[in-house]
Amino acid sequence: MKKKFLSVLFTAALSMTMAVGSFSSGAFAEETEAETAAQADTADEAAEAETAAQANAAGEAADAETAAETDTADEAADAVRIGALSGPTAMGLVKLMQDAEDGITENTYQFADLSTDPSTFVAPLAKGDIDIAAVPSNLASVIYNNTDGTIEVLAVNTLGVLDIVERGDTVESFADLKGKTIYATGQGATPEYSLRYLLSQNGLDPDQDVTIQWCADTTEALSYISSDEAAIAMIPQPFATVAQTKVDGLRIALVLNDEWNKLDNGSSLVTGVVVTRKAFAEDNPDKIAAFLKEYEVSANYALTNIDETAALIEKYGIVPGAVAKKALPDCNITYLTGSDMKAALSGYLQILNDQNPASIGGAMPGDDFYYEAE
């Protein structure tokens, strides 16, 4: 009886234990499932948050890029577009070019590649593809006459840059050129007209008393100087200074700008000017005023900071710095505006017109050729 009781008790206890075990296992499973679900929900929420953050970041980046592109496009549309020839007419611009690159100018500027061809900027000016250009003085008049007066001169930026050079010491004045052969560049352009005028003003007939042999370029003229110790040539700065580094004994015998000034005829030997489209000037008077102010600073900087300007001239690929340093004082960079500009330029154009009206476009330009600030 006792054994039967104990057996029943053991069986009941075992049943309770199994029941408890069964209950505990089911509760644990439920807890595990709940925890897994919670973790899954948390992971989903984190993934969604990360995706949203990435999307927001991408959107903000895209907005910033679009805004930057818009700002760049606005700056480009607002920029003053400038062209210049590689030589003295660009030397006075290099400080402005550097300041524009550094972003410290009042205007935003875009500079076209420097050119050695004077006609490079004729079509862009006519089409409105550039706003301001540094060009030869007679070419400015030609463009004015050929486009019904659509451009005007803002400033004279370069006076005479032509030199007579030789390897000997036979030439001290224009009178010494009688009977000589002069190798020169610039036939049909201002160098020819300037030379012929100075010869005639010093009592020499350009067609009878001297022989002018026209060369295709400075290199050809220098080839005669190199091979013939008695040869004489007329070449412009800074190339005259470059030539002195390549040809032993080459010296500058006459500076045509100085010889012109000796005539004291009220004009100046004007090599280069800065022009603008009239439509641009009329629509943007503040930009023109800012340009003239910044360009004057740049031109004066070239005259007073030779070493720094020479370095910039080399940087922008005009001539090596060492050459620029030596040539700058002889390049006659200037800044003339208003009545001074008009007197110097109109006097020079009149002399060219007297020799060959075609050299300035067929006629003297009108008063509207000369810019006057309102």
Image (tube, rainbow, N blue to C red):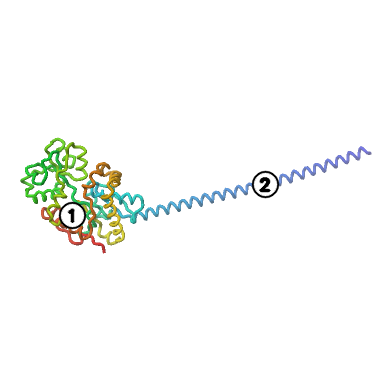
Quarter containing the C terminus: bottom left
Q: In this view, does 6 lie to the left or right of 223?
A: right
Q: Which amino acid does label 2 sit on?
A: Glu
Residue under the image location 8 percent in, 50 percent down: 202
Pointers 2 and 1 in contact (CB under 8 A)? Answer: no
Q: What residue type is labelled 1?
A: Val
Residue under the image location 91 percent in, 40 percent down: 5
Measuring from the top left, give residue 372's x and y in whole percent: 24, 62
Q: How crowded is mark 2: few (under 14 residues within 10 Å), some or many (20 or more)?
A: few
Element on which disc 2 rests: helix
Asked which quadrant contains residue 236, the reply is top left
Task: Say which mark, if any, is on residue 314.
Answer: none
Q: Answer yes or no: is residue 151 visible.
A: no
Quarter containing the N terminus: top right
Gap between marks 2 and 1 measured at Cα: 90 Å
Task: Say which mark, if any, is on residue 142.
Answer: 1
Judge depth for marks 2 and 1 and give the one in front.
Answer: 1
* Residue closest to the eye, 263 or 216: 263
Decide: is 7 above or below 174: above
Residue closest to the far bottom: 374
Which residue does the numbered mark 2 point to in the structure image? 35
Residue under the image location 25 percent in, 57 percent down: 277
Residue closest to the far right: 1
Q: Is residue 332 left or right of residue 211?
A: right
Element on which disc 1 rests: helix
* Residue closest to the eye, 216 or 308: 308
Measuring from the top left, give residue 113's x and y in whole percent: 28, 47
Counting residues from the start of the chain, the first of labels 2 and 1 encountered is: 2
Measuring from the top left, give residue 99's x and y in whole percent: 33, 51
* Residue closest to the eye, 37 or 368: 368
